Image (spheres, rainbow, N blue to C red):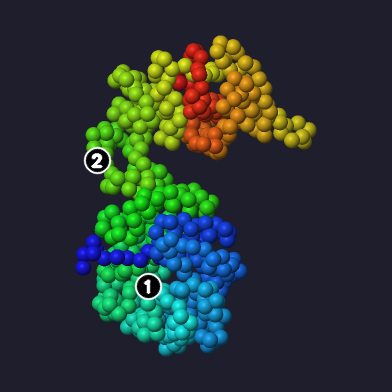
C-alpha cells in the first residue's frame, strides 16, 4: 500500500521516556505545559508518566483528568505484574487503573535472554505475566498498548519466543503491539525486515507500532523504516530527548511523514507550529535548543557559502529540501569571511535595508572579511552586522561615539573585589564623562555607559543584558589569546546579539556593549546627531 494512502498514530513519550535524559527534570507544572503544547501540535497520544513510580506522576493524572484536550489522548505507562504477584493484587497495575486514563501502555520483556538473565523467571512464566497483565487491564475497560521491550534483540536471538510474547499480549486484548529497539542497535534495514514479518504474521488483527532509540544515530531512520514496513503507530519524543543518546525525534519524523511521504499526520497549521513547539519544550526543559536540528534548528535553513547565497536569491529552493515556512522556521543568509557580494546584499535585503550600489556591497563585504580576520564573527551577531550595513550609508549618523574608557579591578586586605569603570562618550558634540561600579569590569562598564546615555536616550532604560559569552579564539596563545565576546540583549519586546573581539577581553566587551546600545536606539527610532562611527568599524 502506498504511504500516501496510509495514516499513522503519533505517540509522544517525552514526559516519561524523554525525562530519563541525563540532566533533565520537569516539575508537575512543567509537564502540564509540555502536554498542552503537544496537544496543540496534533500528537494523538501523550504518555504522561508512570503513576506507580512517584507522587508527582500520580498528581499529573489527577490534574489532566479535569482538563480539555484538542487532539490528544493522555496515556498512563506501567509494566506487567511483578513475578510473584497476582494481577489483581499488583500495585503497579492497580496504579494504572486508578490513573483514570482510557489508554494504558505496559512494557514487558520480549527477549528470552532478558527474561532468563534479568527478570529471572522461566520463559513460560513471562508469557503468563504478559497475558495476565493485559487481561486485567482489559477487564477494567482500558485500551492497552503493549511495549515489546528488547523485541529486535530478542527476535534475532530467538524469533519464535519473541513472537510468542506478542501473541500472548494480542490474545489477551492488546490493541497495539509496539516493537521496541530498546538498546538502539538495530539497523534500519533490519528493522524494516523484522517489522514486515511481524505485520505479515498478525495481518489486520492487531496494529503494529515502532519505538526506536538513537544509540547508533539511526532512531528516526529506524522509525521510518518500521513505518514503511507496515507500522501504523510511531513513538518518539520532542527533540529526541531520552536516556543515553535519546529517542526517535518526533520533530524530524512528523515533517518527514507529512512533507516527504504525504501522510496527513498533523494539519498544515499544526506543522507550521513545529519549530515553536520544539523550542518551547527545550525552554521548559531548561536545555539549549540544538541549532543544527533538522527542520526546526536555527541553522536548519542557514546558508553561508557565497555561491549558495547567490543561488538562493535566484531560487529559494536551490539549497533547501523543503520550504522552512512549512515547519515554522525561516531561511537565513549567514555573514562570514566566506560571504560574497550576493550574500551581503541578500542579508541586507532580509533585514529591510537597501545598499543602493554595488560599491556599498563591496565595501561591506571587505569590512566583514577584515573584521572576521580579527576575531569578529557575524553569523550569530546579526545586530552588529546590521549596524555595519547602516554605517556604510553616508547619511547614517550614530547616536553616540565612544571616546575612551578606564576599567579598574581591586582586591585588598581581604575585602570583596571592587570593579569600577570610567567612560567618555560623545553625544551631539558634547563629551560626557561618567563612572560606574559593578560586580565585575564588564558590569561596571555597562553601568557607566548607561549613566552617560540614559539621560539623552531614555529608551535604554528598558534594555538589559540577557546573556554574555566569551570565546577564546587562538587557544595556543594562553592568557594572551584573542577573545570574542557576544552579548544577547533584550528590551522586553525583542532580542538581539552583538559581538566584539580583541586581545583584551574588556575591550571586546566594550565593543559588544556599545553595539548593543546603538542597536537598541536604532530599534527605537532615536534621532541621531552627526558624528563619526565607533572606531571598531573604521
* Observer-nearest of 233 and 469: 233
Quadrant where the image shows the C terminus: top left
Which residue, as the protein is rendered here, is positioned at the far left?
A: 1
SS at circle 2: loop
- Mark 1 secondary-structure assignment: strand
Q: Position of residue 19 (x, y in %)?
A: 51, 61
Check disc 2: other Cα within 10 Å, few if <14, some if 14-19, many if 20+: few
Q: Position of residue 493 (x, y in %)?
A: 51, 36
Per the model, the C-alpha gap separating discs 2 and 1 is 39 Å
Tell me what residue is drawn at x 36 percent, y 35 percent. Answer: 334
Q: Position of 96 compared to 413: left or right?
A: left
Q: Is any part of residue 245 visible from this angle?
A: no
The residue at which mark 1 appears reads as 178
Q: Nearer the viewer, residue 328 or 85?
A: 328
Image quarter hosting the N terminus: bottom left
Q: Residue at x 75, y 31 (%)?
A: 412
Q: Reply above or below: 422 against 232.
A: above
Q: Name, please, the residue furthest toward the right.
A: 413
* Residues at circles 2 and 1 in contact by the CB criterion of under 8 Å: no
The residue drawn where x is 29% and y is 20% is: 358
Q: How many C-alpha atoms fall within 10 Å of the one at disc 1: few (<14), some, or many (≥20)?
A: many
Residue 132 shown left or right of residue 429 in the figure: left
User: In the figure, residue 105 lies in which quadrant?
Assistant: bottom left
Say if residue 384 shows up in the picture: yes
> Residue 279's x, y, as percent?
45, 49
User: Foreground residue, 69 or 186?
Assistant: 69
Picture coordinates of residue 136, whole percent (x, y): 47, 84
Specify which label sits upstream in the sequence, 2 or 1: 1
Instruction: Give the image quarter of residue 213.
Output: bottom left
Disc 2 designates what residue? Answer: 318
Horizontal arrangement in the rendering, residue 364 relative to residue 119 (left or right): left
At horizontal 37% and vertical 72% (from top left) the residue drawn is: 178
Amino acid at each position: 500500500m502506498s504511504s500516501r494512502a496510509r495514516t499513522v498514530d503519533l505517540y509522544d513519550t517525552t514526559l516519561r521516556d524523554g525525562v530519563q535524559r541525563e540532566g533533565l527534570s520537569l516539575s508537575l507544572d512543567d509537564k502540564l505545559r509540555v502536554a498542552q503544547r503537544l496537544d496543540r501540535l496534533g500528537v494523538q497520544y501523550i504518555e504522561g508518566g508512570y503513576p506507580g513510580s512517584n507522587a508527582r506522576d500520580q498528581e499529573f493524572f489527577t490534574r489532566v483528568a479535569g482538563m480539555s484536550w484538542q487532539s490528544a489522548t493522555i496515556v498512563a505507562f506501567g509494566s506487567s505484574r511483578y513475578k510473584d504477584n497476582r494481577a489483581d493484587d499488583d500495585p503497579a497495575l492497580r496504579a494504572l487503573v486508578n490513573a483514570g486514563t482510557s489508554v494504558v501502555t505496559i512494557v514487558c520483556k520480549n527477549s528470552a535472554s532478558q527474561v532468563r538473565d534479568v527478570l529471572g523467571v522461566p520463559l513460560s512464566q513471562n508469557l503468563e505475566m504478559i497475558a495476565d497483565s493485559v487481561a486485567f487491564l482489559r477487564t477494567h475497560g482500558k485500551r492497552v498498548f503493549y511495549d515489546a521491550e528488547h523485541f529486535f534483540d530478542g527476535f534475532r536471538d530467538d524469533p519464535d519466543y519473541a513472537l510468542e510474547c506478542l501473541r500472548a499480549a494480542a490474545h489477551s486484548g492488546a490493541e497495539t503491539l509496539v516493537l521496541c529497539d530498546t538498546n538502539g542497535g538495530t539497523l534500519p534495514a533490519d528493522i524494516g525486515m523484522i517489522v514486515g514479518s511481524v505485520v505479515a504474521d498478525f495481518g489486520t488483527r492487531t496494529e503494529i507500532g515502532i519505538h526506536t532509540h538513537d544509540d547508533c544515530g539511526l532512531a528516526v531512520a529506524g522509525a521510518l523504516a518500521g513505518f514503511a514496513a507496515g507500522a501504523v503507530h510511531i513513538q518518539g519524543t520532542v527533540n529526541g530527548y531520552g536516556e543515553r543518546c535519546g529517542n526517535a525525534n518526533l520533530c524530524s519524523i512528523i515533517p518527514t511523514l507529512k512533507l516527504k511521504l504525504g501522510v496527513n499526520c498533523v494539519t498544515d497549521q499544526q506543522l507550521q507550529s513545529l519549530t515553536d513547539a520544539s523550542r518551547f519544550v527545550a525552554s521548559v526543559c531548561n536545555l539549549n535548543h540544538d541549532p543544527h536540528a533538522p527542520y526546526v534548528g536555527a541553522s536548519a535553513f542557514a546558508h553561508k557559502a557565497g555561491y549558495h547565497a547567490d543561488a538562493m536569491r535566484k531560487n529559494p529552493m536551490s539549497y533547501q529540501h523543503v520550504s522552512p515556512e512549512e515547519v515554522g522556521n525561516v531561511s537565513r543568509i549567514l555573514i562570514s569571511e566566506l560571504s560574497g557580494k550576493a550574500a551581503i546584499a541578500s542579508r541586507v535585503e532580509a533585514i529591510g535595508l537597501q545598499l543602493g550600489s554595488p560599491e556599498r556591497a563591496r565595501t561591506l563585504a571587505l569590512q566583514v572579511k577584515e573584521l572576521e580576520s580579527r576575531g569578529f564573527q557575524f553569523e550569530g551577531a546579526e545586530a552588529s552586522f546590521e549596524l555595519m550595513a547602516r554605517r556604510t550609508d553616508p547619511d547614517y549618523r550614530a547616536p553616540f561615539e565612544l571616546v575612551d574608557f578606564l576599567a579598574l579591578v581591586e582586591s585588598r586586605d581581604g575585602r570583596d573585589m571592587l570593579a569600577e569603570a570610567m567612560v567618555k562618550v560623545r553625544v551631539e558634540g558634547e563629551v560626557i564623562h561618567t563612572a560606574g561600579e559593578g560586580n565585575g569590569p564588564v558590569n561596571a562598564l555597562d553601568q557607566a555607559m548607561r549613566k552617560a546615555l540614559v539621560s539623552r536616550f531614555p529608551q535604554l532604560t528598558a534594555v538589559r543584558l540577557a546573556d554574555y559569552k566569551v570565546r577564546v579564539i587562538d587557544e595556543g596563545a594562553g592568557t594572551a589569546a584573542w577573545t570574542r565576546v557576544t552579548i544577547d540583549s533584550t528590551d522586553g519586546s525583542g532580542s538581539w546579539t552583538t559581538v566584539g573581539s580583541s586581545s583584551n577581553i574588556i575591550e571586546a566587551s566594550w565593543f559588544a556593549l556599545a553595539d548593543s546600545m546603538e542597536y537598541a536606539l536604532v530599534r527605537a527610532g532615536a534621532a541621531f546627531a552627526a558624528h563619526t562611527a565607533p572606531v571598531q568599524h573604521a
